[in-house]
Image (cartoon, rainbow, N blue to C red):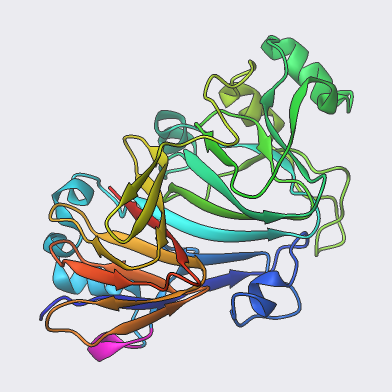
Amino acid sequence: MTTYPLLLKPVIKDYIWGGTRLKTEFGYEGGDIAAEAWVLSCHKDGRSVIQNGELKGKTLNDAVSLWGNSSIGERAAGFSYFPILIKLIDARDRLSVQVHPDNRYALKAEGEYGKTEMWYVVDCEPGAQLIYGMNKTINEDEFRAHIEGETLSEVCNHVQVKKGDVFFIDAGTLHAIGAGILIAEVQQNSNTTYRVSDYGRIGANGKPRELHIDKAVDVTVTAPPSRPYGNVGEIRAIRGGVIRQLADCEFFHTDLLTVSDIMEVGKADSFCSLVCIDGECTLNSKGFEPLQLKKGSSLFLPSGIKAQLSGNTELPAQLLYSYI
């Protein structure tokens, strides 16, 4: 069966801290709350569904299984699992303070891979903040004491954010998205999270949500973050618009494309994910029907397929462009 570009329907998660912007602004279907949209996912906890072509109604997992490694490319095929998961996150309220383990710890403790991730701030309310690492170096005993004494905030690095900010979150980095922030997240394909503090909130079952203090103490890097953050990422003009590098690591590469004319996309050795976060454009590829991409559209471009994005100079489209 011939591979072709896949439009994907996201999986919607209705966590208690979520809002409604993913429904009202991105057009996603959901209940009263749409906290997360898993816009590219092969994870067992939520799999993207194909919306076009002969595989319509099947999952992305089905397509990859049917098409084989040639559809994801040799880079992705080098992983023992589909390597990435991409989300849009609408935090009406603040998320718990949490940390993710690395591959070694997660495989041993949870039976799945760890999670390194990148955040791109799509939008935020004035004065919105998040937690990114520690504000000073402490030891494990001090970290535990701050958790148990409910003084953890004193040693967290609180960052006021603005639209367009970037945060690269290595496994082991303490973090929390604050209220009033809309984020795009590119991450390893894992759903393992260790909750350190949840401000005493009550879950849907009427009980405080579970904390994972011992595991968090095991994996957290109790020092300030070493990577630059905020208004970072090389920006350069290319044919058809502008490209900004957001993340480049062993697990994934992500750019922000601003498309105002005709821009080439596609990789010979990796699949590509295109998630439109603003504006509209058209994807054209020889032998396939043109596809309209608008705010909220998520597209899986199989390895080896070259395509063109056609944008509009008056209303340029912005897309997250991720590959391995």
Q: Position of residue 239 (x, y in %)?
A: 27, 57
Magenta segment boundaries in residue numbering: 51-56
Q: Is residue 234 visible?
A: yes
Q: Is residue 189 left or right of residue 67?
A: right
Q: Position of residue 199 (x, y in %)?
A: 86, 42
Q: Position of residue 134 (x, y in %)?
A: 69, 21
| Residue at x 17% of width, y 64% of height | 71
Q: Quadrant of the N terminus?
A: bottom left
Q: Is residue 61 visible?
A: no
For the residue pair 212 and 321, the one nearer the viewer reads as: 321
For the residue pair 173 and 246, the one nearer the viewer reads as: 246
Q: How many marks?
A: 0
Q: Is residue 109 left or right of residue 196?
A: left
Q: Is residue 74 above or below residue 46?
A: above
Residue 291 sits inside the magenta stretch: no
Residue 53 sits inside the magenta stretch: yes
| Quarter assignment of residue 180 | bottom right
| Residue at x 41% of width, y 36% of height | 234
| Quarter assignment of residue 217 | top right
For the residue pair 19 and 291, the one nearer the viewer reads as: 291
Residue lying farthest to the front in this orientation = 314
Q: Is residue 74 above or below residue 27?
A: above
For the residue pair 259 and 314, the one nearer the viewer reads as: 314
| Residue at x 15% of width, y 67% of height | 305
Q: Position of residue 205 (x, y in %)?
A: 81, 63
